[in-house]
Each structure stands twice: as structure tokens, then as C-alpha cells.
Image (cartoon, rainbow, N blue to C red):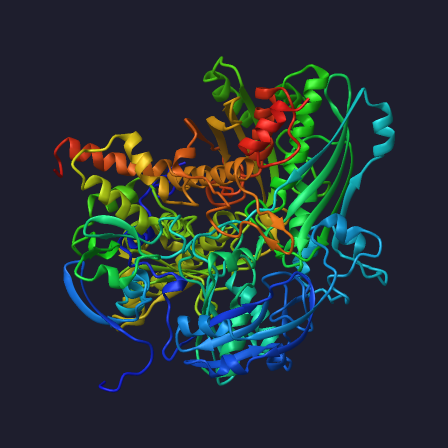
Amino acid sequence: MGENVVGRSVRRPDLIEKVTGAAEYCVDVTMPGMAHAKIVRSDRAHARITGIDVAAALESPGVVAVVTADDIAALYARFGHIISDHWILATGKVRYYGEPVAVVVAETVAAAADAVELVLVSYEDLPAVMDVDAALAGGAPLVHEQSYDATGDESFQNLSHLEDEADDTEAVLSNIAHEVNVGWGDVDAAFAEAAVVVENTVHFPMLYAYAMEPYNAVASYHEGALTVVSTAQHPYMVRDDLARVFSLPLSRVRVTSPYLGGGYGSKSYTKVEPLASVASWVTGRPVKLTLTVEEAIYTTRVDSARIWVKSGFAADGTILAREFDIVMDSGAYADNSPLVMAKSVNRCFGPYRVPHLRARGRSIYTNTSPASSYRGFGAPQGNLAGETNLDQAAERLGISGADIRRRNLVRKGEEILPGKRGIDADIPADLEMVVESLERDRKDVPYYGIGFGCSASDAGAYPISTAQVRVQIDGSVLVLSGSTEMGQGSRSLLAQVAAEELGVDLSVVTVVQSDTSVTPYERTTGASRTTTLVGLALQRACADARSRLRDMAAELFECSPGEVRDLPGAVAGPDGRELDFGAVVRQWFGGSAGEVTGVGLLRRDGATQKMPPFWEVGMVGVAVEIDPETGVVAVDQLVTVADVGFAINPRAVEGQDLGAATQGLGSALHEELVYDGAQLANANVVDYRVPRVKDLPRKIDLMIAERRDGVGPYGAKGAGEGTLNPIGGAVAAAVARAVGKWPDRLPLTPERVWRLMSSD
Amino acid sequence: MTEPSGPPRVPVTVDINGVSVSRQVEPRSLLVDFLREDLGLTGTKVSCELQVCGVCTVLVDGRPVSSCTFLTADADGAAVTTVEGLSDGQTLHPLQESFVDNFALQCGFCTPGFLMMSKALLDGDEVPDRAAIVEHLEGNICRCTGYEPIVEAVEHVAEQLRGGTHG
């Protein structure tokens, strides 16, 4: 359609800063007079705190202060954007091993670490609930003896299906942090009529995102204002939490997110910012807190899940009804798990026609590390159940995995959630691309299997985005956005969009991101929203800037604004006179100075009225070859389709897809946090094994489907989560076909596969 | 300065990216902290602190080491090269160019380690093939890219070396 800058795999300018070591990450940021913090953490799962003796620590060389819950009792000492149940420092009792109990502030990191050992916390142990069965048992000890008011994130209600449950009756206290129910039709009647009913249970592992830069923040509380630089994906959300803690106006809290060393959802919402901030509030000094990887694992992990699924089919494989029961271990605090659950329930049954549905999800409090967002947001958990159930049904029905999907996949425009946006993708066509590629290179060897899977995620999150462009007197352009660059490439992509819209060279566009006192509001950086929603806001900002420039040019040309035409990087008057943007600004202000700001605002309106803003399709295939002696699973083929509508930077899209798929392969084959008693047995990167270069699939086929069917700029939709979501089910199906037995859990480690093969 | 205070110190002299640096450091000072905190060379990053992720890799006398577990005192008299020393400030090193061209990084946090590890390989006597590159980079974790673009980026530079472009 004639675009010049978008649709091309341009070099990302931010990558140049990163290869030289010049790029500034949060962990590189210092503040004048800064002190350092280390955290005293609980060494038990569930215990009443009977005393904290800080005397010895205070006498340790270089120690400035030791902050405990008592010191911050005057503050609103909790956070949580859905349920504000998360105490900044354990208050009264600890709820999990690793929970922060005190902050030691010292002149150096080493001095703080030394003094941590000298803080003596006395406990009285309480019975702990270490898994969901214990937490749900009759008479189970409560992780929280009180209920908390919802923080009132209204958009959360719009995102999930809570309309029916808004009026909660006086609930009996339990370890259920949150429950979500979705359904329609008459499920029981449909099951009674089904030719085949297939039922299975799957277990999704407890994961860690392992963004390689651990959570860190530096905070300065000074004269009623708080400045924080942190590893936050959503600096505005963190600002809101911090403003509540200190009862400050939003304008007095500034949160900045420099380059993030990985995010993958795990840096969504508030993490260590309150700890650094209260330490600064108590000491009057800027305080920096950098976690170790072990501490980061104990800060946020991924919800593990047990999912029971039952589906009824007609004899030809048509789905008649589906039922899901999802139980997630969400750990000691809710954090974002209620939304993860809401998404899991929305996404578990897949992009299929399901005439009758009953899906229930429960997030359970346990005395374990708190769980929250991770790439895919509940989709990988639910999808594993839904897709393996479908493949097992295909076996029972004697049809192929491709055919059962062909029979049931929704077509473009069909709704899978009543009242929500219809599917804005050609999923059946995507499926054919995957199957064709997989079959083309299928090997005829023993212990070889292929599997594929589909998912559709209600992506984009709530559409509130703003953007600004500032046209300078030399025609160069600043783009301002509150969306965070964490590796996904938004800094480069937004520059491409601005250059395209304004008709200026990419090299004169600079993008500034994620400073709540400088860059305009952005609700979150997640759910693959930036390309679509910030992209739209930015297009509007560019149009606004152009409109202002036309008005100014009209004054200079002494004509009406309607007579001024747009040219690339310039305008033309009715007499054919042309002025580039810089000249318009200079001449209008008259002093070789000034600038023009264009503003773009996006809300739930017009094209972005229907939720979700877009569907993110996940479409993957894998082929595996298993060593029968060892159970080692080698990935022979990885095939993905990025159904992105329009790829603004195709190489960047491929990068997102391979990255997401590789993380998915990690959770399918290697990754699992394992609790052994009160604590994790493998809270480190040695024992928690993530994919390495030798795990590369032998064949990688990354395809992009561009049908311009998204609401975003140029028909674009988001990418970045899609290929992670269906990988687990695809791998499970491939392994099942290779060995002739169905696994019921991930990861499929060599031992698990060997045991599966050796079982009767 | 005559009255000793605080923890004991040891003198070190290290050549950092061609500049000789002499300092008194704590015996427990780690090379990565020396680089990042004492010298402000923050290009080198830290992640696992267990010598298994490769993020903090720097070259000590041309040999790749994990600076998160390497004592500064043990670098006394050695030449240390960090990511800041790869480029001459004017033009990027061929590896840096190739990483950018091949989208071999996203968040970039692991990239200094991959660059230094790759440099050590390419500085060797033999121009590596794909298998040798994969073998050599097994100790470096990247969580963003899925590795293939990294392998391609290094292969690309190896091909240039083989063709004599930068030999």
C-alpha cells in the first residue's frame, strides 16, 4: 500500500547502544549520596514474627538503618493493583520463605549484606499450606486471615468476566484468592448427546521467567516527592501504587524505566520499588536495591496449574461442549494472578466453536513465592489442557490432529467469547501453513512425532494510550511514549511509525520512553499492545502535528488551512510554494526557535471500542525425536506463524516469535521450580535449567502471515506472546505420538519421558 | 591516609582496555564490581553470580572469564578487555556490526558476554565453523532471541575472516 519506512527490517538504533555497552539499564543508575539496601528474608514458610532484634546489625560498620514493618506503620504499607494484599515488609507474620522482613541500608552493598546476617528475627511457626491441595483442604490454615478491599482497577472488570460477581456476598475466609467462571449453553445436555467424551488432567509447571537483569530500583524520597528509577514494565502502575503508599499526589511521584534487561511480563506491576522507597523515606537518602537471581525468583514466579478438562464431540469430531476446572497455585500474595486466571479461563478452550462451555478457575493462596504475570498470561496453562484434550479426542475418533482442528476452528469474524470482538485472523489458513511445513520435513524414523497447537488470546489489554511528537526547528522529531523498551523493539518500531506518518527520514526520529514526569501516559507495556495501541496513538499524534503545521503554514502562506497540502516532511501552499517542517516552525515563531507538539489520545472508542483490541493468534508446530535409551527429547523442527496483520519490522517479529517459542520449549522440556519443604530446591540458574544454544531446533521455520486485518497501524496486530502459548501442548502431543503414551505434565525431562516409555 | 581504617586493602594494577589502572581494593573485591562500581565501566553486566550464565564475561589476557566470580586481586598485572574496549570509539567491531545487522540481541543484557565470548573464539588460530560456534557459546544464556540470530551473527563474521576481509 505504498509505505516507505514501515514493513522493512530496518536496523534497530537501540541495538547499537547495546552492543557498545553504552546503553543504560536500571542496574547502572546511581543517585548522588546513594546508600545500598539488602533484604532480610524469612527463612520459614509460615510463622508469626515474635521479635526483630536489629541492635547488632545497627552496630555493624557502614550500616545506616534497619527498616522493619514497625517503621513504616504510618504509611499505607501494602500494594497490589487488583487486591492490595501485598505487605511491603512482613507485618505480624511471614507467609512464604523468602518474604522481605527488614531492609538493611548501608554505605556499600557488602556492608549491607554483612549486616543482614546480624538481624535476628524470632518466629513462632505456623502450619503451612505448601500446595493447592493443602490450601483447599477442610480446616486448612489461612494464608491471609483478612480479606482486602479490591484496589479498584476498573479496567480489570472490563478485561475479565467479573460482571456477574461484582456483588460479592460476605465471603467466608478461605485460601481462594480469586475465582472466575465463564460459560454458556447447556453443557450437561450436550455431554449426554456426545458420541465421544474425552477427559484428562494436566499439570503445568511452576516457572520462572528469568529476565536476566534481576529486579532492581533506586529511590529518592525528598521533601514530599519521590523519584524512582526501576525495572518496571509499567512505570505508571508503579507510580500509582507508590503514591498510595506515601499519600502523595501522582504528580509528586516520578517513576522512570530505562532499558530493561528482559521483562517477559515478569516485570509487570510493582516489585522492589516500595522496598527501596520506604528505605529512602526512613533514611532521607537515595537507596538502591538490586536483587540476586535467587531473590528475584522469590519475588515473582509463574502460576503453576492443575487443569481438568472434559470435551464432548459428535462422531465427525465436531465439538459439542467443553468443561474446564483450572486450579492455580498463586503463592502468598495475589499480585496479578487474578488477571492471569481470568485470561486462562478465556483462553483455555481455544479458537474453536464451542456451543456449550463451562470453565471455572480458582487462584489459590499458598505459603510459596508469589506468582504473577508471565508472557502469555494464563494462556500456556489453559492451552496445554485444551489442546492435548483435542489431540486425544482425535485419536479416539480416528481422525488427524489437523482434521479435528479444521472441523472446529472459527473463521474470521466469528466470536469465541460472546459480545467480544470477533476473530480478526484467518486461523485455518495459518494452520495449513504450519502443517504443510511440518509434513514437508517429517522424518521417517522411530520415536519421531509431530505436534501442533493453536491459541487465540484476548490481547492488547485495556486501550488507554497516549503519545506525543515534537517537531523541531531542523525538522527532526522527538517521539514520547510511556511504553517501556525491554528488548521487544518498541523504540525502533515507534520511530518507524513516526517517520512513515510524517514522511521524514528514520535517522532524524528519536524515541523517548517511560518517564512518568516526561513521557505521556501509557497504561501498561504488556499483552502485546504497544504496536497496536501506542502505534494508533502515535499516528494520531503525527496527524495532530501535521494539522498544527498546516495551520501555521496557512498563516505564513496567507491562505486558508484547507489549501495547505501535506508533503513528506513538508507542506505546500496553493501557489506551489513548499516549506519543510523545520522552516514552518522557524518562520511561524520568527526567531529560529520553537517547536510543535502533536498529541495522540486513544481510548475505548471507535475501532478500539470492542474488547479485546485484537486477538493474538498462536500457531506452532514441533517435531521431536526421542532417544529411547535416555528419554532425551531433541527438537527436530520448530514451525511458527506470526499472524500479525502487518509486520512493521519483519526481522523483529521473527525475533519475538523465536524468542517466545524458545521460552515455551524451555517450559515444555526443562524448566520447573520445585519446592522441597518450605523452600525451593532450585532457586538458581544452575538447577533451574533454561534453554541453551545447543538446544536449538534443527529446523526453524518462522513464517509471517500479513493480511492487514488488525485495528493497529497499517492493519498491524501485536506479537510476542503468541508462539509461547501453544508450545507446551504441541510438544506433549509430539512426544505422545513418538512414544505412544500421553504425558500429563510438563516439563518433559529425560527422566519423565523415560519413565513414560517404561510404564505399563 | 596513614591511619588504616575499614577493611584491609590490596594493591592492584590492571590494564583495562589499554589503560593502566592502579587501585587499592578489598581482598574480596570481584572483578565485575571493580569494573562497574570502581571504574564506572557498566557495560559488563551481572546475572546469575554463579558462573553459569555468561553475562559477565570479560577477557583476561585474552581468555574469557566470568568476572562475577573472578577476584580483582587475581587480575593484578593482567590485561582486561571489556565490551567498552571492543570498538575504537569510531567504528564498531565486526562482531558488534554483525550482532546489530542480524538482530542477534533484543534486551541486550546478555550481549556484552556473548560479544566477548565470541571475540575469544574468533581471536583463536582457527576460523570456527557453525558447530564450533555453538559449542563455544554453550555457556552463555540468552533469554530473548532463541540463539539462532546470535549463531548467525558470529558465523557471518567468521565467514568474513575466512574470506580475508578482516583477516
Residue A46 seen in render: yes
Q: Nearer the viewer, residue B92 or A428?
A: B92
For residue A288, what is the image quadrant?
bottom left
Residue A422 seen in render: no
For residue A469, what is the image quadrant?
bottom left
- Which residue is drawn at the image coordinates 76% and 53% (left, top)? A135
Q: Nearer the viewer, residue A141 or A438?
A: A141
Quick check: A415 left or right of A220? right
- Which residue is drawn at the image coordinates 35% and 37% (left, top)? B149
Q: Position of residue A63 (x, y in %)?
A: 45, 80
Quick check: A344 left or right of A315? left
- Which residue is drawn at the image coordinates 80% and 54% (left, top)? A165
Q: Look at the image and tell me in which quarter the N terminus of chain A lies.
A: top left
Q: Nearer the viewer, residue A40 or A244?
A: A40
Report the residue that reaches farthest toward the top.
Answer: A444
Q: Examine the rendered structure and indicate whether residue B106 appears above or below residue A317.
A: below
Quick check: A261 left or right of A586? right
Q: Where is residue A697 in the image (x, y as percent from the top left)?
A: 43, 29
Q: Where is residue A465 in the image (x, y as percent from the top left)?
A: 53, 57
